[in-house]
Image: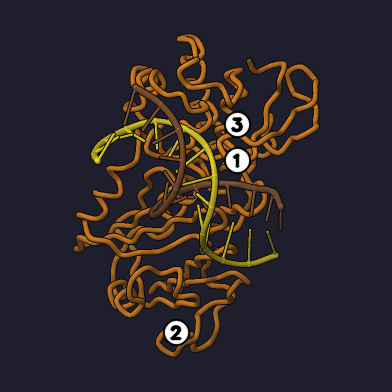
Chain colours: A orange, B brown, C yellow
Amino acid sequence: MPELPEVETIRTDLNKKLKGETIQSVFIVLSRQVRGSTANFKSFLRGKVVDKFNRRGKLIYISFENSDKFLLIHLKMTGQLIYCKGDNLIAGGHSDNNKPSCELDKHTRVVFEFKDGASLKFNDQRTFGYLEIVDKNKLDMILSKFGPEPLKKEFSLEYFKKLLQARSAPIKAVLLNQENIAGIGNIYADESLFMAGILPWRPALSLTDSEIKKLHKAIKDVLRLSIKSRGTTFNNYRDADGNRGDFIKKLKVFGKNNEPCPQCGRPIEKNKTAGRGTHYCLHCQK
DNA sequence: CCTTGTGTTCTCCG
DNA sequence: CCGGAGAACACAAG
């Protein structure tokens, strides 16, 4: 479940590895995950030089030198972007021969092959993710639907207060909606609500000023801490080198059903809130 | 049957 | 009847 910290970890890593590199060819295993024509997808990308890996919420978009089009990559729940260089190369492998240039994993769906010999594998066990080439207009349209980035100034306490004041939905549902705040998913919704001492099903408008302030800080703190730990590997997430994220060691409630609460020792409970599995401590959260 | 991020569709309410 | 909010469902695979 890559959320903001996981996608940010991947983005910064790949930016270091692939900025300025040239795409030589693209090998497509499962065309269903490439939106639009796969022939156009391949022909557009061939020879393109990576300008930058960018992120908005949980969405990665790659810009290219001398091009006004972008490659969107959404990992959804089980997507991975795995970089490999040098090792595991297959002799004669090239997408033009319908042969990949590197060893595929069980769930590899697309491989980008670079001129310097490196490959970038898009893996996705559950095939919910997608890749798409879009022009600037479409990119802007998509990006404009996202709420503020929670780690930027635009996510102000004022904005957060206004957001919550007229909503009867559970606070967790408000946090999960990408149009409200970009990048929070199930893990960080539960964790930030625990940090702030707020029960996930409380109507958003029932939060007091001091609770809103606590939650605003908790969201930023938990996301920053997780980025420092290179994200949370609960099951599927891997960084660009195939490594796990360490933040799972610092989770307080997510996935801890029936385990003792780290604050009070009473068992963590789990229910379904906002349609999602939700973890909380009835004693520490009000 | 369960899991989840997102897009779509349905339903409710003023 | 309209619009918006929120809930419910669809998707896929293991």
Q: Which residue is mark 3?
A: A190
Secondary-structure class at tag 2: loop
Q: Are marks 2 and 1 in contact (CB under 8 Å)?
A: no
Which circle's residue, 2 or 1, is located before the other in the chain? 2
Q: On residue A94, which mark appears?
A: 2
Front tag of 3 and 1: 1
Give the chain letter at badge 3. Answer: A
Say few, some or many: other residues with alpha carbon within 10 Å of mark 2 (under 14 / 14 to 19 / 20 or more).
Answer: some
Q: Position of residue A171 (x, y in %)?
A: 51, 26
Q: Amino acid at mark 3?
A: Asp
Q: Position of residue A27 (x, y in %)?
A: 44, 78
Q: Are marks 3 and 1 in contact (CB under 8 Å)?
A: no
Secondary-structure class at tag 1: strand
Q: Quadrant of residue A147?
A: top left
Q: Residue at x 46, y 87 (%)?
A: A98
Classify A136 as above or below A3: below
Q: Residue at x 61, y 43 (%)?
A: A232
Q: Quadrant of residue A200?
A: top right
Q: Amino acid at mark 1?
A: Arg
Say few, some or many: other residues with alpha carbon within 10 Å of mark 1 (under 14 / 14 to 19 / 20 or more).
Answer: few
Q: Which residue is mark 1?
A: A276
**In the rendered picture of this protein, how many numbered marks are placed on residues?**
3
Q: Is residue A283 left or right of residue A151?
A: right
